[in-house]
Image (tube, rainbow, N blue to C red):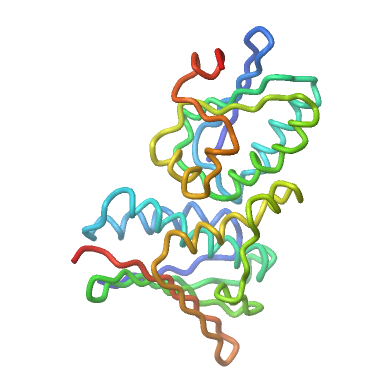
Amino acid sequence: MEHTIQLICQTTALSELRKFLDKNLSQIMLSEKDKHQVTLAVEEVCANLIIHSHHCNGSDHILLNLRQEDGRLIFEIKDKGKAFNLLDYKAPDLKTVISEKRKGGLGLILVKKIMDEIEFESQGGTNTCRLIKFFGS
Amino acid sequence: MLSIETQQENQHYILQPKGEIDASNSVQLDESIRSLAEKGAKSILVDGSAIDYISSAGLGVFMSYLEDFQEQGITLKIFSLSPRVLEVFQILGLDQLIPIFPEKEAALNA
């Protein structure tokens, strides 16, 4: 099982992303709860790239590849924006989010809580973020 | 798609978002809450029964008002969230910071 979608770098593409995931995750033996959570995590990473790396520039694109390998679901997100390494990002704690009245900062905490593994690499101007979820066994 | 309806019941303002809340439209939720506070609302209840999906952009809106509302004596409560939307609050522990109730009556009486 392998599926790919190209998204334009605008937040309106996020609903298209959810439809893509809803359709293609339905083929996988994953609980409804896990499907919802991985959808949320993938959306959070894409929203972060769209807003912060690409500044909602509709002429930029993100490529998402979804594949299943040996009990692992792999969401590979590629872009050519400013590299953002999720692994280096120190998520703020909730108290900081509240006291600074930040409306952002929560998404990447969700990603780290939901996904089992996160990989990042940047090569030749292309950034690749892999979100991995183990399922079944 | 997101639409937000607001109605007043006695001293309470009830706000009902309908649809999916994400980074493309969370500003609508923000504006609705801010406009109620500017109108002088002291009790804002969010009817979550028609929220189909919420991402961190929507959660962040609620979080951003916590401190100001506490200082201004404004209460913000949420009720009737679907299990999967409630779960997003729970993953982050926001259910410990924002009063969330299973139904409207419980929120009104709390």
A107 in relation to A80, above or below = above
Q: Residue furthest bottom?
A: A124
The image shows residue B101 at horizontal and vertical percentages of 49, 25
Quarter of the picture containing the N terminus of chain A is: bottom left
Q: Residue furthest left?
A: A137
Residue at (45% x, 58% y) in the render: A17
Left or right: A121 in relation to B45: left
Residue at (66% x, 71% y) in the render: A53
Q: Quadrant of residue B102?
A: top left
Observer-nearest of B48 and B7: B48
The image shows residue B34 at horizontal and vertical percentages of 75, 32
A40 in relation to A91, above or below = above
Quarter of the picture containing the C terminus of chain A is: bottom left
Left or right: A69 in relation to A128: left
Q: Quadrant of residue A67?
A: bottom left
B13 in relation to A19, above or below = above
Left or right: B98 in relation to B73: left
Residue at (65% x, 42% y) in the render: B63
Q: Residue furthest top?
A: B10
Residue at (29% x, 71% y) in the render: A72
Observer-nearest of A93 and B52: A93
The image shows residue B85 at horizontal and vertical percentages of 45, 40
